[in-house]
Structure formats: structure tokens, C-alpha cells
């Protein structure tokens, strides 16, 4: 069988498929739909230093080809996460990536310290780009602040650090480069796009805070371009995400340069999506005569002078 091992800098995963942060909860409510231990990694809902209630309802709105959300990062706080959720998550049997967020840099740093002391945490994903909380986009839209928060976390932990980037910026390549220079091991690209909806009967925005984050099939071409551009403009490993709902969607991201993929909205309408994507990638590699996942990472760049071979060798070297 082809080797599905995914390499994200120092972080090795048994396959490249994981849930996007905030979507793993659908498995907790639907046991038996998929074995979480079969995934390359599990990414937690975002954890904050102190408990947060999230935004008031309504929080979700289905659109013609995507999902608008303004959930607002509800969190039990790091204390409850460590005592109540982490012991259960350790039992899953795959890599555990903990998503963290803060309103200030010191909160990210303190979370990194506390999680770095815990057994069973494989990596930290910095949620720098939630569009649904006050100041949520500041860390990902200001290169100076992005560099400072990644540097602060890097200083406090030896765990692999993944910076989750917003697409709502002038140049996502610049932000990816900034994260890499500050010490991030990988980037997640991309978080949701800002959007909104208006209730025509009430004649006002649907959401209390007006804007929400758009995910789902509508954003896939936009997210794919972001991954393509980051791959060409940097050498940092990429977790591609944004509208993936089929094996072919995932393969597009891998061929465009992602080393792994995260699936979000599709988990809500088809809880078997990730299992189907893993199987589809395996079949694609074997039918194409590829020995490993690394053989197809960035392969779509080869005819366009993107240095795909150089990237693939570099990523594999980091994984050894």
C-alpha cells in the first residue's frame, strides 16, 4: 500500500486528514459514525485561557453553497479542558492538535506553557483569525502582531506550532512568510471568509454582530488559490482547508501544495466525509503508481516553474 504519512515540519501524521477546529464535536454527538483514531490528527475546538460563552444566537445560517457562522469561540477555559476534555481526547489514539486563542499575546503564551506540560498534545494550532470575535482578526491581519504572537508562543514551547491564517488580508503569502520567520512549523490555510446575511422580514442583519464566517463549497476555489500562492511563495508546510467535501477536493489541495488537509463544514452534512477522503487518497496514490503522499504534494506546480521537487524534498527531509 502507498505510504499516507503526512509531514508537517517536525510533526508526522499517519495520514493527511483531520477535522477543522470546531467541527470535531459532531463526532462526539454521533458516536460510531467514524473512528476518530483512524484520522491523521484530531484538532480540538479552540481553547481559551478563561471560559467564554460564545456569541448569542442565532449562530449559524445555511446559504446556497456554504455555511455562515458566528459561533464566537465558546470555550470551557483551559482549566476545565485539562481536567475534563484532555483525558478523553488522549484515548482516541491519534495525534492531538490543540487549537488555542487569546485576546492578548500573553494569553497565547500562557496557554502554550500549560499545554506544553501535558502528555498527549502533539502540536498547537494558533487560532489567529476568527472573524467572529472582537479583535479576532487583529493577529492575522497585522504582520507585526502576527510575528509577535508566534514568537511569544515559540519561546514558551517545544511543541510544533501551526499558525491558522485568515484569507481576509491583502497578502496571505506575506502573512505565511511572517509566521514562518517567527518560528511557526506550519500554517493552516484558510480560515473562513467574512460574510453576512440580511433578514428581509426584520429588515436587519441576521447576526447580532452583523458579520459571520463563510465556509463550505463556496470558498473552495478561493482557499485553493491561497494554498497555491503560499506554496509558491514560501517553504512552510501547509494544512489546506476550505470547502473540502470529496476525495477529489482534498487531492486538489494536496496537488496545489498542501501537505495535509482539514475538513470542516462537510462533517456536518456527511459525518463519513473524512473516512471517504482517506480511502480516496489511498486509491489515487495506488492507481497512479505513487509510493507515498509526498510524491504528489505540490505536483501541479511542476509544469509552472513552482519548484515542486524542491519543496517535496525539503518537506521530506524535515520529517526524517
Image (cartoon, rainbow, N blue to C red):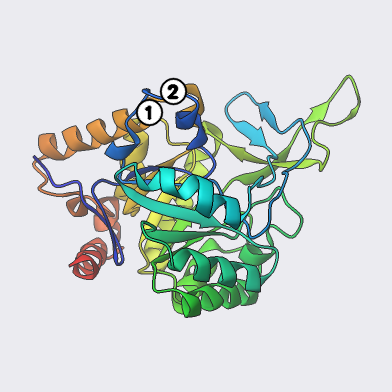
The residue lying toward the viewer, choosing from 48 and 196, is 48
Q: Is residue 210 left or right of residue 229?
A: right
Q: Quadrant of the C terminus?
A: bottom left
Q: Is residue 39 left or right of residue 70?
A: left
Give the Cα distance between marks 1 and 2.
6 Å
The residue lying toward the viewer, choosing from 28 and 240, is 28
The residue lying toward the viewer, choosing from 135 and 50, is 50
Secondary structure type for disc 1: helix
Seen in the picture, residue 314 relative to 136 is either above or below; the reply is: below
The answer to whether residue 82 is seen in the rendering is: yes
Seen in the picture, residue 124 relative to 234 is either above or below; the reply is: above
Q: Which residue is mark 2?
A: 270
Q: Which image quarter: residue 60?
A: top right
Q: Is residue 300 left or right of residue 219?
A: left
The answer to whether residue 44 is seen in the rendering is: no
Q: Residue at x 58, y 30 (%)?
A: 66
Q: Which residue is mark 1?
A: 273
Q: Residue at x 51, y 35 (%)?
A: 25
- List x then y, in percent, for residue 95: 33, 51
- List x then y, in percent, for residue 73: 65, 47
Q: Residues within 10 Å of mark 2 (few under 14, many from 20)?
A: few
Q: Are marks 1 and 2 in contact (CB under 8 Å)?
A: yes
- List x then y, in percent, for residue 309: 20, 63
Secondary structure type for disc 2: loop
Amino acid at each position: 500500500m502507498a505510504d499516507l504519512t503526512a509531514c508537517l515540519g517536525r510533526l508526522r501524521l499517519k495520514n493527511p486528514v483531520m477535522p477543522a477546529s470546531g467541527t470535531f464535536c459532531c463526532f462526539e454527538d454521533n458516536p460510531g459514525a467514524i473512528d476518530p483514531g483512524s484520522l491523521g490528527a484530531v484538532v480540538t475546538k479552540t481553547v481559551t485561557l478563561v471560559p467564554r460563552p460564545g456569541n448569542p444566537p442565532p449562530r449559524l445560517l445555511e446559504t446556497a453553497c456554504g455555511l455562515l457562522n458566528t459561533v464566537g469561540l465558546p470555550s470551557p477555559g483551559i482549566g476545565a479542558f485539562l481536567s475534563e476534555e484532555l483525558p478523553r481526547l488522549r484515548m482516541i489514539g491519534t495525534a492531538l492538535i490543540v487549537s488555542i486563542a487569546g485576546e492578548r499575546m500573553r494569553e497565547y503564551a500562557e496557554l502554550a506553557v500549560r499545554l506544553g506540560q501535558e502528555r498527549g498534545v502533539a502540536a498547537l494550532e494558533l487560532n489567529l483569525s476568527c472573524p467572529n470575535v472582537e479583535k479576532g482578526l487583529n493577529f492575522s491581519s497585522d504582520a507585526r502582531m502576527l510575528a509577535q504572537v508566534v514568537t511569544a508562543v515559540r519561546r514558551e514551547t517545544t511543541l510544533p506550532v501551526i499558525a491558522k491564517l485568515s484569507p481576509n488580508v491583502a497578502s496571505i503569502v506575506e502573512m505565511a512568510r511572517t509566521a514562518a520567520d517567527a518560528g511557526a512549523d506550519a500554517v493552516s490555510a484558510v480560515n473562513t471568509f467574512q460574510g453576512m446575511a440580511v433578514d428581509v422580514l426584520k429588515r436587519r442583519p441576521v447576526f447580532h454582530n452583523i458579520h459571520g464566517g463563510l465556509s463550505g463549497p463556496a470558498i473552495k476555489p478561493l482557499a485553493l488559490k491561497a494554498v497555491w500562492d503560499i506554496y509558491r511563495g514560501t517553504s512552510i508546510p501547509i494544512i489546506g482547508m476550505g470547502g473540502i467535501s470529496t476525495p477529489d477536493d482534498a487531492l486538489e489541495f494536496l496537488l496545489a501544495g498542501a501537505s495535509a488537509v482539514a475538513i470542516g463544514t462537510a462533517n456536518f452534512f456527511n459525518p463519513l466525509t473524512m473516512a471517504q477522503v482517506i480511502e480516496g487518497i489511498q486509491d489515487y496514490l495506488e492507481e497512479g503508481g505513487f509510493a507515498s503522499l509526498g510524491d504528489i504534494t505540490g505536483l501541479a506546480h511542476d509544469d509552472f516553474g513552482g519548484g515542486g521537487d524542491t519543496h517535496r524534498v525539503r518537506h521530506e527531509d524535515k520529517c526524517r
